[in-house]
Image (cartoon, helix red, strand yellow):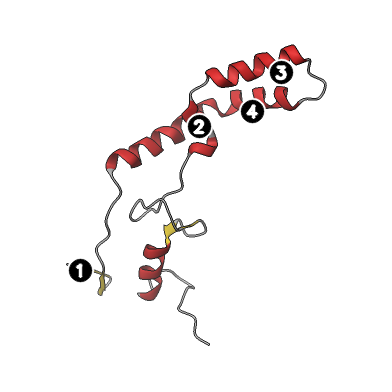
Amino acid sequence: MARRAFGFLIRPRIMAKKGKLEKNERRARLIDKHAAKRKELGAVVRDPEATPGEKRQAMAALQTMPRDSAAARYRNRCQMSGRPRGFIRKFGLSRIAFRDMSLHGLIPGVRKSSW
């Protein structure tokens, strides 16, 4: 069943599971909370002047931190549907939502190309 938005019919979107979205938000909060400490420890590990003992301590400290506080574990998701794949960073949308919105003229400056 299609719904109307701005006078156009738009396909219904299947939303991601709420648990997945909440987990991603929790990761974002953990990343913000531990970013400074991770950066500091990472600098010690990469520092060529640091002794092997200091590097070992820094690595051990990094390993004791929560896994989800690593920025690499955060997943970009579509703002409309929560879809994790086919993400277009510039617009914050998945390829499917981007296509639907652009075809209906809902994204300023974007239109279907033809040649």
Measured from the top left, where is residue 54 in percent x and y?
Answer: 72, 14
Q: What residue type is labelled 2?
A: Ile
Q: What element carries label 1?
A: loop
Depicted 4 relative to depicted 20: above or below? below
Task: Name the one closer to the observer, 47 or 101.
Answer: 47
Q: Is mark 2 on a helix, strand or loop?
A: helix
Residue in view at x 40 percent, y 38 percent: 24
Residue in view at x 42 percent, y 58 percent: 93
Q: Is mark 4 on a helix, strand or loop?
A: helix
Task: Name the one closer to the observer, 99 or 111.
Answer: 99
The reply to whether the C-beta atoms of the residues labelled 3 and 2 are less than 8 Å apart is no
Q: Which amino acid does label 4 sit on?
A: Lys
The reply to whether the C-beta atoms of the residues labelled 4 and 3 are less than 8 Å apart is no
Measured from the top left, where is residue 41 in percent x and y?
Answer: 65, 22
Q: Which amino acid does label 3 sit on?
A: Lys
Q: Which amino acid does label 1 sit on?
A: Ala
